[in-house]
């Protein structure tokens, strides 16, 4: 941990992981699924869908699949899990609509007000593996006040590839230490730290749902450890 | 010209050219230069700087210079013209500050209110040859409410390369005809039209300053021809 006021002075750009950090993917998918297909175990469905996410990006990064956007990876994973949940009968239009639930994820309750505060003193961007279209639709619907939407799609590489973290610094013509990654995932933060970025860990104990609480105990190495984004705004004096 | 209400229903994304269309580069540069270096012919200086812009991008697109962002092209052009205006003595810090005037361009008087109206029914993005960092700083300072900032930098090609226009449609997973380019330059609009985008021409008669009024008479081929962005919002029913 370092002095937060000193950090606030040196960090120009706050780059946010999105899924799980800014928005509640689990709760949002559960709510949509319960409304559309109440017979399905929505909690298990949401976790199965998300579980396919990292392996799919890894296939792309290993070159086993050409560059593929998250919208398309989400659809591939969806097509793979639907039979298991008794939804193999969904037609293309229904699958397309369901796949776009990732465009309609709800922010955590603290998110929007905290981003508005942080925005007064910092440039806020996304650094998400989600594609630009997804992140734009999500921001418009949820009122997320990004100054700039950056994505793996811009850098043609998925986090934790160093190209993504260094890419943010490059876009803003800054040193890596003038950028802070804000994320609820230690592997993401470790990737950023290895590139010289500052890091803030955000506790999101309910990321995987109330039935599967996440260990959010502090780990060494992060510059800040915060309960939520409002706490981050407090620490940074916004 | 087509039926504007029909257009309003089919066009999802409005992609905006920025320099000259959304912001007043000539007036902004003149004002900064008059404040910093009142002895210089600010009008001639602004036009000389801008005149180097297209040739510089063309050198990049011909491969004579590797991919170079507009911030760096602006600096190269600036270094080239400073002696002609008696400013060869400016040091690196002064040149860097002056070069960033492109981050500090003022919007036209109608811009911000019109974008707020247009944003209620459409997704608004930039499609500018300006780099992401420049466009983000400009938007933050001027209060331009973009849903997403897209740039030649994302597509690694400068307008009027088709990759840029088709890239916008691709980012939003739309057909080209669901995207409309809004610009004050006929060559830009022609490039977009050739790719199947809809086009709206915006009159900006003072783009090159009051001493050099621009011919803004309608040309065939554009879907809409508007006096300013407020007029565009009127026609699209926003």
Image: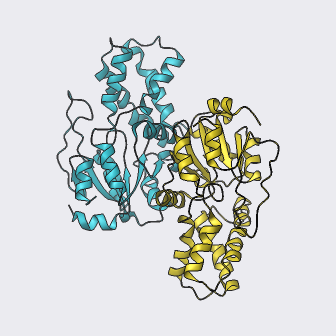
Chain colours: A cyan, B yellow
**Can residue A46 be seen by looking at this rendering?**
yes
x, y percentage for residue A30?
Answer: 32, 24
Looking at the image, residue A3 sits to the left or right of residue B12; the answer is left
Q: Is residue B166 above or below residue B33?
A: above
Q: Is residue A77 above or below residue A122?
A: above
Q: Is residue B159 above or below residue B52?
A: above
Task: Say which residue appears at 46% left-offset and 26% top-offset.
Answer: A99
x, y percentage for residue B43?
Answer: 69, 75
Residue sitting nearer the eye, B134 or B227? B227
Residue sitting nearer the eye, A78 or B106? B106
Task: Say which residue appears at 22% left-offset and 58% top-offset.
Answer: A235
Q: Quadrant of the N terminus of chain A?
A: bottom left
Q: Quadrant of the C terminus of chain A?
A: bottom left
x, y percentage for residue B160?
Answer: 72, 52
Task: Say which residue appears at 74% left-offset and 60% top-offset.
Answer: B62
Looking at the image, residue B116 sits to the left or right of residue B23; the answer is left
The residue positioned farthest toward the left in the image shown: A217
**Can residue A62 be seen by looking at this rendering?**
no
x, y percentage for residue A39?
Answer: 32, 11
Task: Say which residue appears at 65% left-offset and 82% top-offset.
Answer: B82
Residue sitting nearer the eye, B215 or A128? B215
Looking at the image, residue B213 sits to the left or right of residue B235; the answer is right
The residue positioned farthest toward the right in the image shown: B220
Looking at the image, residue A32 sits to the left or right of residue A156; the answer is left
């Amino acid at each position: 941990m370092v002095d937060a006021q000193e950090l606030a002075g040196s960090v120009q750009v706050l780059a946010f992981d999105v899924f799980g950090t800014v928005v509640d993917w689990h709760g949002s998918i559960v709510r949509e699924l319960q409304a559309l297909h109440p017979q399905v175990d929505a909690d298990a469905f949401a976790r199965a869908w998300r579980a396919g996410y990292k392996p799919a990006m890894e296939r792309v990064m290993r070159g086993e699949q050409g560059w593929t956007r998250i919208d398309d990876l989400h659809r591939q994973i969806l097509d793979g899990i639907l039979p298991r949940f008794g939804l193999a009968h969904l037609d293309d239009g229904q699958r397309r609509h369901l796949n776009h639930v990732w465009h309609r994820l709800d922010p955590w309750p603290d998110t929007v007000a905290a981003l508005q505060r942080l925005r007064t003193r910092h440039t806020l961007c996304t650094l998400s593996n989600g594609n630009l279209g997804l992140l734009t639709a999500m921001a418009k619907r949820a009122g997320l006040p990004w100054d700039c939407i950056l994505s793996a799609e811009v850098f043609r590489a998925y986090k934790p590839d160093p190209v993504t973290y260094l890419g943010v610094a490059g876009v803003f013509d800054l040193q890596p230490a003038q950028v802070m990654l804000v994320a609820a995932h230690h592997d993401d933060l470790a990737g950023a730290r290895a590139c010289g970025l500052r890091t803030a860990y955000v506790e999101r104990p309910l990321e995987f749902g109330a039935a599967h609480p996440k260990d959010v105990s502090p780990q060494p190495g992060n510059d800040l450890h915060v309960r939520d984004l409002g706490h981050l705004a407090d620490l940074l004096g916004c």
